[in-house]
Amino acid sequence: MKTIIVLAFVAILAALAFAGIFMIKRGPAGEPTPKGRMARALAIRVGVSVGVFLFVLLGYSLGWIEPTGIPVGR
């Protein structure tokens, strides 16, 4: 479970890094690269983030993840 979440966070950071590279990188002769690549990388980042959120909710509802930490009412 932890491994899957860590790999998803690495994928989120990689997609964010690729979006930054695509934003800065220029094409031949100083022409900007198509913005579609940056938008696609950001869309992948958002999709993976939503997937991680849903996976955590599913894991909690199936009992794979149990709450710990501060007791309720404090």
Image: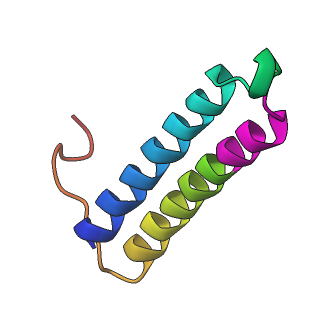
In the displayed structure, 30 sits above or below 41; it is above
**Left or right for 2, reference 54:** left
Residue for point 21% across, 34% down: 74
Horizontal and vertical percent position of residue 63: 32, 80
Horizontal and vertical percent position of residue 24: 63, 20
Q: Residue furthest front?
A: 29
Residue for point 30% across, 58% down: 6
Q: Is residue 34 magenta?
A: yes
In the displayed structure, 22 sits above or below 12; it is above
Count of picture labels: 0
Q: Nearer the viewer, residue 17 or 31?
A: 31
Horizontal and vertical percent position of residue 26: 71, 23
Residue for point 55% across, 52% down: 49
Q: Nearer the viewer, residue 47 or 61?
A: 47
**Left or right for 20, reference 41:** left
In the displayed structure, 14 sits above or below 60; it is above
Residue for point 67% across, 25% down: 23
Q: Which residues are magenta?
A: 33-43
Q: Nearer the viewer, residue 26 or 74?
A: 26
The quadrant in which the N terminus is found is: bottom left
Q: Is residue 8 magenta?
A: no
Horizontal and vertical percent position of residue 35: 82, 33
- Quadrant hosting residue 31: top right
- Quadrant hosting residue 30: top right
Task: Give the overall secondary structure of the magenta segment.
Answer: helix
Q: How is the image coloured?
A: rainbow
- Quadrant hosting residue 73: top left
Q: Residue furthest top?
A: 30
